[in-house]
Image (cartoon, rainbow, N blue to C red):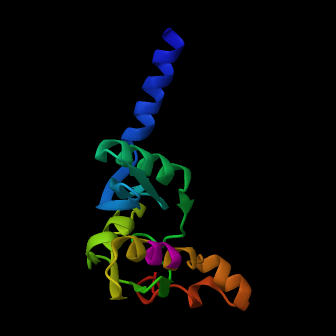
Amino acid sequence: MAILDLRDHEVFEERSDLDERVVDITRVAKVIKGGRHFAFRVVAVVGDNRGQVGVGIGKARAVPDAIRKATERARRDMRPVPLVQTTIPHEATGRCGGAEVFLKPAAPGTGVIAAGGVRAVLEALGVRDVLTKSKGSSNMLNVVCATLDALRQMRSSEEVARERGVPEAKVLPFWRRGR
């Protein structure tokens, strides 16, 4: 019995250091012969504020069950993203469905210039300075997925410098070149 309590305590500690955010709760309906069956779809974002982020979708008849499913799936989906201090290494555009999200690195002190799902994903990732633009569909699930698509395109400055065959200083953002 003590071992189970210890495991539960470790799981609780693991959860406490992750940044969990519920981005969207939507009521969905399944139409059947006798009428409609309603449920809830939850989009959740989980990040460690140090360069890893994951998104999960959960559906259930009750909101708390849907939130639990979404956060569990987001934990399993966590992926690393290269960062440069408090921003992203380069510009990127992500698309999902009708949504399009543009991410652009910003100088320190700028803040997260984003709203809704894009802000939730970037803050859970640990980005503190970035400029964004969301175009097309405002469907929160598609906006979050488009943000993830843009983040998957991110490559570290070392990787880009190695591919181009130039020193790393040539591919760094403008505010880091002089240092």
Residue in view at x 41 percent, y 40 percent: 15
Depth check, front residue: 155 or 61: 61
* 148 in the magenta segment: yes
Residue 31 in the image, given as x and y percentages of width and height:
39, 62
User: In this orientation, does residue 1 appear?
Assistant: yes
* 86 in the magenta segment: no
| Residue 34, quarter of picture | bottom left
* Horizontal side, residue 133 vs residue 85: left or right: left
Outermost residue, top side: 1
Residue in view at x 28 percent, y 78 percent: 114
Residue in view at x 62 percent, y 83 percent: 168
| Residue 33, quarter of picture | bottom left
Residue 95 in the image, given as x and y percentages of width and height:
49, 84
Magenta residues? 145-149
| Residue 43, quarter of picture | bottom left
Secondary structure mostly seen in magenta is helix
